[in-house]
């Protein structure tokens, strides 16, 4: 078996010819009447060169970090990094950036979900469970570089497209990216299925490209605009999440557009303020939010004066070649082993029992927690550079740890999204005191003075006091009601909210 690392490094990265540029053929002359307009065009079937075929047939090896001190800043979420594979390579790709590890992990999972297309799925009933993901990176502007994992993923998908086994595969699995600048009409045009004929050994091969798009939106506030035509697009993206075999879109210009073999993935980035101000009501109550995995980071986990690639660590080129191997080799139905299925069933029963008993309120982003967990488990299995379609217990446990951590981070963010101004401000004040553990009224006013007037702050503090979420003192004496003095001190109560 050839050495994968040596082979991968030997392959050039030349730009492929545009897939939609047909070869020019001489016009055929007809007697007695003008040439008839051609209704279809045939393309010459082309196979990849031997180096590409060897690449796709040779199992890659994950990057293994050298022992000893690490040449980068340690991130608290490093404990969540799964078994060596594509996800770990992706994380090591971004070690020299300010993107938090949890962002990089989800960037890798989203990239894998886009690469899978409808070529692989999770065992389900009555139809397949496709591994598509909608992920949303949320962080204050400039603090955590939330667009970095999206840029990495898009670049890897584009570069991996250079390594297709033939022109038919390249056409059928071409990535069509939607960015922040795309209009609703442009999105619908890209979703249109397309058919193309290739000539192979004097035979016609019909290739079909399905209704597949990959949304990479670094400024999601643009998509979530409350303008009427954008709200309609949000509704359509919500409806397309389930990736039905057939569907349709109604457009003003062209009427009903048929869709076939739908497959949509999305990665977006937005600030907390942008999410609060931009989110339309259509996204709530079972809308787009319930289909998204929201990855929230309010503080930077590492600081670099400038981004850099750690010497000796993976590069975009090397990881893209490994992604090409995954997309070519990981196909068909994936199923849990008996051990993994037993562990999932135990978790699901406990989770559903707590929901039915009303032990905690189910947030919008938790409605599909069970199917999301199965998708992540599959993607972690796909991430491993080894053949096979069995999802192991380790895959499930690693997926559960990642999802639990992520939903815990996003819980504070979603508490005020879509609510009234009062509920949003209540959440802001509560989260601020919780983060600091202790805060004076003056500190709270300094932090939210331009958003929350002093009189409203008094009402908010009184509600938090009534709920037992905080306790207050003034001049070392306990208080039951806020008095308006800047010297008031408020302490967060971890077991509060019981009154």
Image (cartoon, rainbow, N blue to C red):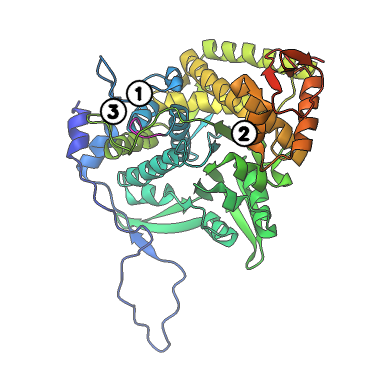
Q: Is residue 415 left or right of residue 216?
A: right
Q: Which mark is residue 60?
A: 3
Q: Which residue is under mark 2?
A: 127
* Foreground: disc 1 or disc 2: 1
Local crowd size for mark 3, using a 10 Å CA cut-off: few (<14), some (14–19), many (≥20): many
**Which of the two discs, 2 and 3, labels the residue nearer the N terminus?**
3
Residue 458 rendering spot, x and y as whole percentages? 78, 31
Q: Is residue 138 left or right of residue 332?
A: right
**Which of the two discs, 1 and 2, labels the residue nearer the N terminus?**
2
Q: What element carries label 1?
A: loop
Q: Residue at x 36, y 35 (%)?
A: 97
Residue nearest the viewer, comparing 137 with 332: 137
How far apart are the two marked residues, 2 and 3, measured between alpha carbons? Answer: 32 Å
Q: Is mark 2 on a helix, strand or loop?
A: loop
Tell me, yes or no, if residue 289 can be seen here: yes
Q: Looking at the image, which residue sits at the far front?
A: 475
Residue 348 rendering spot, x and y as whole percentages? 65, 16
Highlighted range, magenta: 94-98
Locate the N terminus and report the quarter of the image it occupies: top left
How far apart are the two marked residues, 1 and 3, measured between alpha carbons? Answer: 8 Å
Q: Residue 156 carries which label?
A: none
Does the magenta segment cover residue 86? no
Residue 222 rendering spot, x and y as whole percentages? 58, 53
């Amino acid at each position: 078996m050839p050495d994968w690392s040596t082979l991968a490094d030997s392959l050039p990265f030349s730009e492929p010819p545009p897939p939609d540029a047909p070869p020019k053929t001489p016009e055929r002359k007809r007697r007695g009447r003008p040439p008839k307009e051609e209704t279809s065009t045939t393309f010459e079937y082309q196979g990849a060169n031997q180096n590409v075929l060897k690449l796709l047939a040779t199992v890659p090896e994950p990057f293994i970090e050298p022992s000893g001190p690490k040449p980068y800043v340690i991130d608290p979420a490093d404990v969540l990094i799964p078994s060596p594979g594509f996800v770990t390579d992706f994380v090591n790709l971004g070690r020299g950036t300010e993107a938090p590890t949890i962002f990089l992990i989800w960037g890798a999972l989203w990239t894998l979900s886009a690469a899978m297309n409808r070529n692989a799925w999770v065992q389900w009933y009555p139809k397949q469970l496709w591994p598509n993901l909608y992920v949303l990176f949320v962080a204050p502007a400039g603090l955590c570089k939330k667009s970095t994992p999206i840029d990495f993923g898009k670049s890897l998908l584009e570069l991996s497209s250079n390594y297709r086994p033939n022109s038919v595969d390249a056409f059928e699995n071409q990535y069509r990216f939607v960015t922040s600048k795309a209009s609703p009409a442009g999105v619908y045009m890209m979703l249109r299925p397309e058919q193309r004929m290739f000539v192979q050994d004097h035979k016609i091969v019909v290739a079909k490209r399905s209704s597949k798009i990959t949304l990479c939106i670094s400024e999601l506030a643009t998509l979530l605009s409350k303008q009427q035509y954008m709200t309609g697009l949000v509704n359509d993206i919500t409806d397309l999440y389930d990736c039905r075999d057939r569907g349709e879109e109604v457009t003003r210009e062209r009427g009903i557009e048929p869709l076939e073999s739908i497959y949509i993935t999305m990665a977006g980035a937005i600030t907390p303020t942008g999410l609060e101000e931009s989110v339309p009501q259509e996204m709530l109550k079972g809308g787009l939010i319930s289909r998204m995995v929201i990855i929230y980071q309010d503080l930077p986990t590492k600081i670099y004066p400038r981004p850099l690639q750690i010497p000796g660590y993976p590069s975009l080129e090397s990881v893209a070649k490994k992604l090409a191997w995954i997309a070519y080799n990981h196909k068909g139905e994936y199923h849990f082993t008996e051990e993994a299925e037993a562990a999932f069933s135990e978790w699901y029963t406990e989770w559903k029992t707590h929901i039915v008993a009303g032990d905690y309120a189910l947030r919008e982003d938790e409605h599909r927690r069970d199917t999301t967990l199965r998708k992540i488990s599959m993607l972690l299995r796909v991430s491993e550079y080894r053949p096979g379609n069995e999802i192991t217990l380790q895959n499930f446990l690693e997926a559960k740890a990642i999802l639990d951590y992520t939903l815990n981070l996003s819980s504070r963010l979603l508490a005020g999204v879509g609510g009234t101004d009062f509920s949003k401000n209540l959440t802001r004040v509560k989260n601020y005191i919780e983060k600091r553990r202790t805060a004076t009224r003056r500190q709270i006013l300094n932090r939210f003075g331009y958003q929350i007037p002093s009189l409203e702050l008094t009402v908010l503090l009184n509600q938090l006091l009534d709920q037992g979420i905080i306790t207050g003192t003034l001049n070392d004496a306990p208080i039951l009601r806020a008095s308006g003095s800047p010297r008031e001190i408020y302490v967060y109560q971890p077991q509060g909210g019981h009154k």
